[in-house]
Amino acid sequence: MYKCIRCGRPLEKSFGTAEIECECGSRVFIKERPGIEKVILAR
Ligand SMILES: [Zn+2]
């Protein structure tokens, strides 16, 4: 589960070949895991 770092909106799409951009325009996401937060920079 990914979450936008700017607006906190959960991202339904999965990271892969497609370009990902939140509706707010941010391309920085947090990968949510129990106890771990990893920042993901979308290409
Ligand atoms: Zn956003």
Image: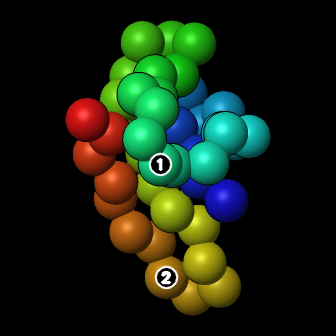
Position of residue 33 measured from the top left corner of the image (x, y, whole percent): 60, 78
Judge whether residue 12 can be spotted in this image: yes
Specify the label residue 39 is tagged with. none
| The N terminus sits in image quarter | bottom right
Task: Give the labeled residue for mark 1.
Answer: 16
Name the residue rendered at 67%, 39% in the picture: 13
Name the residue rendered at 65%, 85% in the picture: 34
The residue carrying pointer 1 sits among few (fewer than 14), some (14 to 19) or many (20 or more) residues within 10 Å by Cα, namely: few
On screen, residue 11 above or below 34: above
Q: Which type of secondary structure does the marked residue at label 2 adopt?
A: strand
Give the CA separation, mark 1 to mark 2: 21 Å
Task: Give the labeled residue for mark 2.
Answer: 36
User: Looking at numbered disc 1 in the image, what kind of residue is underneath it?
Assistant: Gly
Q: Quadrant of residue 29?
A: top left
Q: Which type of secondary structure does the marked residue at label 1 adopt?
A: loop
* Viewer-nearest residue: 35 or 26: 26
Name the residue rendered at 45%, 72% in the picture: 37
CB atoms of marks 1 and 2 within 8 Å: no
Among all residues in the image, which is located at the extreme front?
17
User: Looking at numbered disc 2 in the image, what kind of residue is underneath it?
Assistant: Ile
Judge whether residue 6 can be spotted in this image: no
On screen, residue 17 above or below 32: above
Position of residue 35 measured from the top left corner of the image (x, y, whole percent): 57, 87
